[in-house]
Structure formats: structure tokens, C-alpha cells
Image (spheres, grey):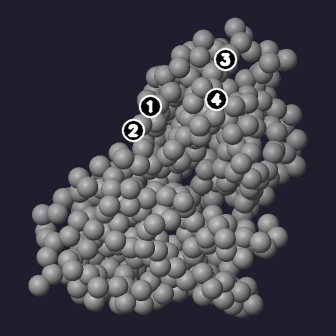
Amino acid sequence: MLGKSSLWICCQLGAREHYAIPRALHQHGKLAHLITDAWVLPQSPLNLLPTPWLANLRDRFHPDLTQASVHAFTSSLVRFELTQRIQRTSGWERLIARNYWFQQQALQSLERITPLLNAYPTLFAYSYAALELFRYAKSKGWRTILGQIDAGVVHDQLVLEEHAVYPDYQSTWQPAPSYYWDTWKEECSLADQIIVNSTWSSQALQQVGTSTNKIYIVPLAYQPPEQARNFRRTYPLAFSAKRPLQVLFLGKVSLAKGIAPLLEAAQILREKFIKFLLVGSQSIAISQQVKMLEQVQWIGAIPRSQTAQYYQLADVFLFPTLSDGFGLVQLEAQAWKLPIIASRFCGEVVTDRVNGLILPEVTGEAIALALEFCLNNPGQLQAFAEAATDMSEFSLSQLHHHLQSLPHAHL
């Protein structure tokens, strides 16, 4: 008879969080298997293709997992993606098809693995691509843990409302079909525990009836770049036309990220010594009038390798998101000692008036008030920078500690 096991099987579609959960488990000898859609070793011929070709596949590897048992379906993924393009699927149709394809591939791996197990493992999978895997795991008596990547259906509702408020910002965004949420609710039901990354996500899940006893808050793991360790940030005695307050927004330029209130704030503050740097791909239509705002610099999408220069250049990081499971960019900003102005609807990185400011609401007026405070108090920005978050709180070891602290009582 199989007994209890502290070993985990991780099922992961994509390179989410740079494989932080399987890496943390493997580091401590707790990872039995990683099942993922693609795994491209450094010596793979795929790395010889021109950069634009299958570019995202280059991220589908991590040296920390070189010795791990990894099961992947790279060639099948390439065939799937080509078929989807030929069939001209897009949006939710393609995303849901990809989630289903991954689960079918992962099930085949699980069926091969199961006879080799000498104990009941824990099966971990991320939301929206976990239902079939959990059904299988439950049929075997395994423990199931869902990694909830966002605020679920509440997130969709908030973004839908924002599109109604700002109809001029046209986009291709569409709410998920109702059956998408039906399968998600079944995932939540089959999960013994649900890991969320923030209090906000926990509250959102509880709003739609998820049992609070299942939900555990586990912050994301993040390893700051070595060159950020000794970075020192300085501020002028006062901001001026020659030395304006540099405000960085880095992420998708979308209504979900709070871009409409941000641009309202830019208009309110158009006579002030403030410059906005907007870095990221654009998924909404911006009017020519807004595009012409002199203090807003539209930088567009950049490679990840170039983000560090903007974190260093900025004086404050603006993160007015309507809803984020965590918002890893907050940790990236703090690694560079960059003070943050953030909404309450994301991971808890900002302590109000310690290393930044928390917006009471996501409105143009609230953002403008916070930025005016920064503009008039450069010395306070210096204090915020010097009180940047201790990154050891977000280490792989801390992540492993959180994972091992989840209860096993039902086993």
C-alpha cells in the first residue's frame, strides 16, 4: 500500500515565475517530477533559430533544474501552435485550447509515472490548466494544490467595469466565457489547498464562495540582479524643469493595469515638473490628444534585459493596477531601491509611508495627489528608497518554507 509522501509533482504550462515552485522544491529534494509544455536545453538546435522564431521557447529552461526529472512535449507544442495559426484561432478560443492540450499531454505523463511511485505525491498545478489533472490525482488518492495566478472571476468583473467607464479606450479585450469560470470553480473544489500570492487574491476568491480554510497566501519568489545590490539612489533638493520627477510605469499598457487613471493624473499635473515614462506593449487605442501630452514619453515594448536601465533612471514606480495576483514588477523596482506608488489590489510589497505610498483608490485624483506629495518631498523619496524591502523575504528558501508549512491533515 502506498504511504504518505513529501514529494511533489509540478504541472506547469509556460515558464511562470521562472519555475520558482519546482526550483524551490528541487533545491530541498522535494520535487519528484516537473511536467511542462516545453523544455529547451542550452544545446538544443531550437536555440540556433533566428531570434524572432519561437523566441519564447528560449525561456523554457532553468539551470537550477538541470538534474531534475523533467517531462516536456516541445515538438507537440510547436505542432499545436502551428495548427492554431493555420486555423486562425485567437483570444480565449486559443488559450482554452492550449490549456486543454497541455492537460491531455500531462495526463499521459502522469499515467506513465504513477506505477513508479512508492508513495502518494502532492500534485501541484496552476489555475485554468488543472481540472483534468486534479480529477486524475483525486482518483488516485493524491493531495492536490492549486496555484491561483490571479483574482479569478472578480478580476474579469473589474476589468469589464473599467471598459464601461472608459469606452474611448478601445481594445480587443474580451471577458472570459462563462464555461471557463465553471471549470475553474471545479478546480477550486477539487483542490485540497489553494495557493494565492496576495491578500487581495484571497479576498477575491472568498467573494465568490471559495472556502477560506483552503486558501493560503504564499508570496512570489524573486532573486534580485547582482548589479542592483550596491545601487545607490539619490534625489535633488528640489525637482525642476531641468530635473523633473521621473515616474515609471512598466507593464502592459491596458485598462486592467490602471492606465486610464494614470493618464488622467498626467493631465491634472501637466503644469508640474513631472515626466512619465510608459514602458510596455500597448493593448488599447490611445487618442491623439492623449498621445500628445508633453510630459508623457511612450517608450513601448522593450526586451526584459533593458528594464534595469529604466528602474535606475526613475524616481518613483507607479503601479495603479485594478487587479494583480501579485505584481512581480514591484519586487523588481524595490531591488533597485525604487519607491512605489501602488494600488491595494496586488501583492503586499509597499508599506504605506515607509517604502512608498498605497493609493486609497485607483483614480486620476488619487494618483495625482500621491505624485504631488513625491514632487514636493524629495527628501521623503530618499527615505523611502533607503527603506526598500528586504528581498530575503522573497527567496526560494522562504518559498519552500511556505510550501512545506501547508497542512497535510487530510492525508
Callout in the foreground (2, 4): 2
Residue drawn at the location 42% of the way across and 73% of the way down: 69
- Mark closer to the observer (3, 4): 3
Mark 1 touches mark 4? (CB < 8 Å): no
Q: Which comes before the other along the chain, label 3 or label 2?
A: 3
> Percent x, y for residue 99?
51, 80
Please name the amino acid that badge 1 sits on: Asp
* Residue 378 left/right relative to 302: left
Q: How far apart are the alpha carbons under marks 3 and 4?
A: 12 Å
Amino acid type, mark 2:
Glu
Name the one closer to the observer, 82 or 365.
82
124 sits left or right of 16 in the view:
left
SS at badge 3? loop
Can you give x and y, in whole percent of width and height, for residue 404 in the image?
26, 55
Label 2, on which residue?
Answer: 393
| 409 relative position to 299: left or right | left
Residue 346 numbered tag: none
Q: Which residue is mark 3?
A: 234
Tag 4 residue: 316
Per the image, label 2 sits on a secondary structure element best described as helix
Question: Does residue 245 show up?
Answer: yes
Mark 1 vs mark 4: in front: 1
Res 200 seen here: no
Q: Which residue is mark 1?
A: 390
For mark 2, does the 10 Å Cα neighbourhood hold few (<14), some (14 to 19), or many (20 or more) residues? some
